Image: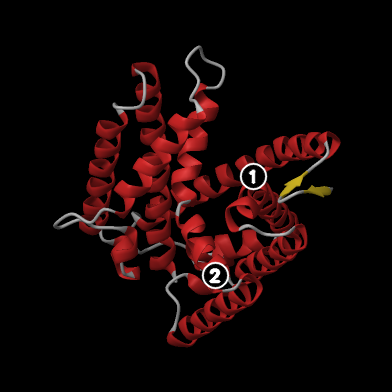
Amino acid sequence: MIYIGLGQIETSETLAEQKSWLAHESEALRSKITTLKADLAESQAADAQPEATPTPTKKEAGGIKGMVAEMMKDPEMKEMLRKQQTLHIKSQMGELTKVLGLTPEQGRKLVDLLIQQQEDQMEHAMDALNPTPDEAKKIADRSKENEAALKNLLGDEKYAKYQDYQKATLSRFETDQLKQQLAPTQDPLQDAQAQTVANIIQEERDRKTPGSVSQADLKPEDYSNPDKLDALFADMEACNKRILTRAQNCLTAPQLEALAQSQARNLEMQKMGLKMAGKMLQQK
């Protein structure tokens, strides 16, 4: 791996290896997720049965949280997630070093620090599921330590830029999805269009309207409250509609249709994730 100027540039051989590894590991992850979904369906079916049931197995007694905990104990799963997170962090560095104005040495140190912090978060991931007061304090303390380490490395000004960059992660991800979806078509998304769409998505995500609900507003018990989740989903759908309306000024009709399709897929994934989170919190 070599560094040129402000960005991190990898050799074509390394990129080819990463592409091959990602294809293999993505298939393995999809298989594990399919297994987890099946376990979730079995757990939900079991919940609907009368109380007169056989003594639960150790796996069943742990509920969804127990199943996830067991999955995270799997060395292969942990290594796969670690590698995926590492590749994700490194994939951002070319753009991030440019945005922050980092030297190659600062870029390398930032990569190492972010990977270290990500691995620490993975080790304590289960603590974040409806934490006890003691667990919540430890989570807050680790967050403060991570913030201090980043500030120490970047300085206040660059750390503020880093926070803005991280805040826009979702809007960049959604725009990249759209760009990849349209790349093989006769109407690919241009860079200027992508930046405009990303800005629109971020602005609408940040917009607070009367009665609006965001995921940040939810308390742990709200994840298992259908009314609370329905209100959140309604707000997400309203936000998507505002994005589509504004995007009409910069996208063609086929591009706009592709954005709507992408939004629908992402919303369904978010709904499934939030419902699964609610199930996990109930089993804590």
Q: Is residue 219 above or below residue 7?
A: below
156 on left or right of 25: left
Q: Is residue 60 at all visible to an observer of this figure?
A: no
Q: Quadrant of residue 265?
A: top left
Considering every residue shown, the one lying at the far left of the view is 210
- Report which residue position mark 1 lands on: 29
Q: Is residue 208 above or below residue 29?
A: below
Q: Quadrant of residue 50?
A: bottom left
Q: Position of residue 269 (x, y in %)?
A: 43, 43
Q: What amino acid does circle 2 point to? A: Met
Name the secondary structure under disc 1: helix
Q: Quadrant of residue 117?
A: bottom right
Which residue is depicted at the point 49% across and 51% down? Answer: 169
Q: Position of residue 145 (x, y in %)?
A: 58, 81
Asked whether 35 or 176 is in front, the reply is 176
Q: Position of residue 277 (x, y in %)?
A: 42, 59
Measured Cα–Cα span from mark 1 to mark 2: 19 Å
Considering every residue shown, the one lying at the far top of the view is 186
* Contact between labelled residues 2 and 1, with CB atoms less than 8 Å apart: no
Q: Which mark is residue 126?
A: 2
Q: What amino acid does circle 1 point to? A: Leu
Which residue is depicted at the point 36% across and 34% down? Answer: 264
Asked whether 255 or 227 is in front, the reply is 255
